Image (cartoon, helix red, strand yellow):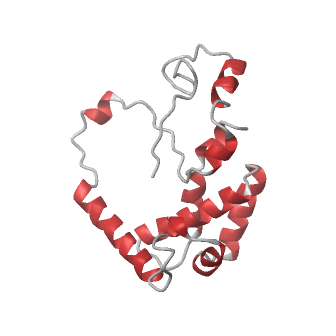
Amino acid sequence: MLVAAMNPCPCGYFGDLKRECRCGPLQVQRYRQRISGPLLDRIDLHIEVPAVEYRDISSTRTEEDSAAIRARVGRARERQQTRFRSDKKVNCNARMGPRQIKQHCKLSDESQELIRVAMTELNLSARAYDRILKVSRTVADLQSCDEITTEHVSDAIQYRTFDRTLWV
């Protein structure tokens, strides 16, 4: 597993709503090109994490606690282990090959159209397509769904932030 972080630009404020970025477009482009597209293509989830606001830190509103999240992830992992129990090489969605993807990531016509538009509009690679299908399957598993819905595909596409914003 790889977890990585990077600033959006050398000064760290590109896209920040409260602070102005001091970097020029060429400087931002050079900074982002330090990480190759093929490397980014191999990372399943890309998300932007904005600065935390004071109101969020001080809020008394309760969110889903870690124990509940852990239990939901555990159930999703059990679903995956059950799904792949007859395959010695695959034990989770991330390890699916083309054959397993075709078998376990069937999409409705509406979901197929959504991913087709995303592939075309965002100029995504075949590798990104496979990643989106695997993540869609995982999102469905986290919600205890047997079928992948358009919402699951949409969520998975949203996790391709760098494909949409950094390399366009």
Residue 91, percent across and down? 45, 73
Of all residues, the one furthest to the bottom in this rendering is 86
User: Residue 128 lies in what quarter of the image?
Assistant: bottom right
User: Residue 74 lies in what quarter of the image?
Assistant: bottom left
Residue 79, percent across and down? 40, 77
Of all residues, the one furthest to the front in this rendering is 88
Q: Is residue 152 visible?
A: no
Q: Is residue 57 visible?
A: yes
Considering the image in quadrants, where does the C terminus appear?
A: top right
Q: Is residue 61 above or below residue 52?
A: below
Q: Is residue 62 above or below residue 69?
A: above
Residue 141, percent across and down? 44, 71
In this rendering, the count of numbered labels is 0
- Report the front residue among 131 and 150: 131
| Residue 101 as seen in the image, left or right of residue 78 | right
Residue 167, percent across and down? 70, 38
Of all residues, the one furthest to the top in this rendering is 22
Determine the residue positioned at 73% across, 54% down.
125
| Residue 66 as seen in the image, left or right of residue 21 | left
- Report the front residue among 24 and 92: 92
Determine the residue positioned at 47% across, 48% down.
2
Q: Is residue 153 above or below residue 3?
A: below
| Residue 25 as seen in the image, left or right of residue 90 | right
Determine the residue positioned at 70% across, 20% down.
25
| Residue 110 as seen in the image, left or right of residue 148 | right
Determine the residue positioned at 63% across, 25% down.
31
